[in-house]
Image (tube, rainbow, N blue to C red):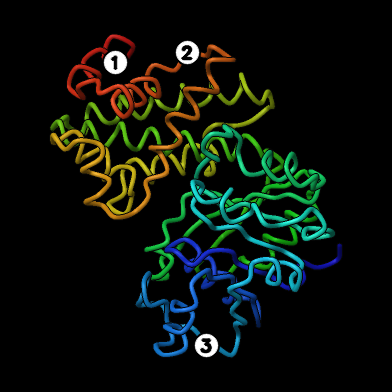
Amino acid sequence: MDSIGKICILGAGTWGTALAKIVLMNQKHINWFIRRDDQIDGFYKLGHNPNYLTNVKFNLAQITFHSNMEKAIKESDTVIIAIPSPYVKQYFRRLWNNTFHGKFMVSALKGIIPNENRVMSEFLASNFKIPIENIGVLSGPCHAEEVAMERLSFLTAASKDQKKAKLLAEAIDSRILKVKVSDDVTGIELAAVLKNIYAIAAGICQGLLYGDNFQAVLMSNCTKEMERFLNGVVPLERNIAEQHYLGDMLVTGYSQFSRNRTLGAMIGKGYSVKTAQLEMGMIAEGFYGAKCIHDMNSLFNIDMPIAETVYRILYEKLPPQNGIKKLIDFF
């Protein structure tokens, strides 16, 4: 593989739209899979996504839209997956192994596949027999809303095939985006799942009116917990302070754009989990991630008091104030 080739984006939510903007900063053309034909029609009428990041204008001559995922993938060389994790199995169930032959599949998911308890790289390798060297990850402290405003952002391109990771990084690096490379595919994916859970914890504490002093201690303990889990599940020499671990956790835990923090804040203020989800009207990946990590950790038995507390608040109706008070004993 001497170039990244033609890039396809799967998904047209906020993150998929931001990724399309990112890719088109450097690339002349993309294929873009959008499930709904009416959303594609909206692009042609308005010149922007009719539903998400509506301030981002596109040159439609640079885009070939597809409502057929298989065709979009087959006409591309590199496929960036930006579908919310709860919908991945539904979207991929009609695809065959040969659809992915020779493709570089890049997960930009911010979550884990519910009921599978597997990150996207594991899902692709297991379900579609894609070689691990043909799987990559894009992750890091990069909110879609800030990409839309062209604020400087950061991502990490990870693959076991470092040549592919570097080609992807070069293909999307631009004046608004700086890209590092890594080979810690699964570790980075799991860190992205954990940071959403920790952002819910931060939001709960915000809703309960804990201050910045407490939040700082919470985040430092989240860092240690993340490191324990990653080292226990995916043993590898890593620096937890890197942008794709700590950096992503901090921006998700503190940012006004964080859906997971918002969900947590509503729960901390007294909303039920279901009511908070309905009022948000958007997916907070940490809700699903909390159960998946809880189930995974039943095999590893790693000390995870913060993630476990969030799980119990979300799924076992533990009162938030009781859960956070008990956490203090671990700090």
Q: Are marks 3 and 1 in contact (CB under 8 Å)?
A: no
262 vs 119, left or right, is: left
| Nearer to the camera, 308 or 252 | 308
Picture quarter with the C terminus: top left
Image location (x, y in percent) of residue 54: 35, 76
Image location (x, y in percent) of residue 2: 86, 66
What amino acid type should be assigned to the residue bearing mark 2? Asp
Q: Secondary structure at mark 3?
A: loop
| Nearer to the camera, 126 or 218 | 126
Task: Sort mark 2 into few (<14), some (14-19) or many (20+) by Cα contacts within 10 Å.
Answer: few
Residue 59 is labelled as 3
The number of discs equals: 3
Q: Residue drawn at (79%, 51%), measured in percent from left and top?
A: 134
The correct choice, above or below, for 195 with respect to 228 in the image is below
Choose the circle earlier in sequence order: 2 or 1.
Answer: 2
Q: Which residue position holds label 2?
A: 303
What amino acid type should be assigned to the residue bearing mark 3? Asn
9 vs 320, left or right, is: right
Q: Secondary structure at mark 2?
A: loop
Q: Residue drawn at (33%, 26%), measured in percent from left and top?
A: 315
Q: Secondary structure at mark 1?
A: helix
Q: Which residue position holds label 1?
A: 327
Residue 309 lies in what quarter of the image?
top left
Image location (x, y in percent) of residue 238: 63, 30
Image location (x, y in percent) of residue 29: 65, 81
Spatial distance from mark 2 to mark 1, Cα to Cα? 12 Å
Q: Which residue is the extreme one toward the front?
A: 94
What amino acid type should be assigned to the residue bearing mark 1? Leu
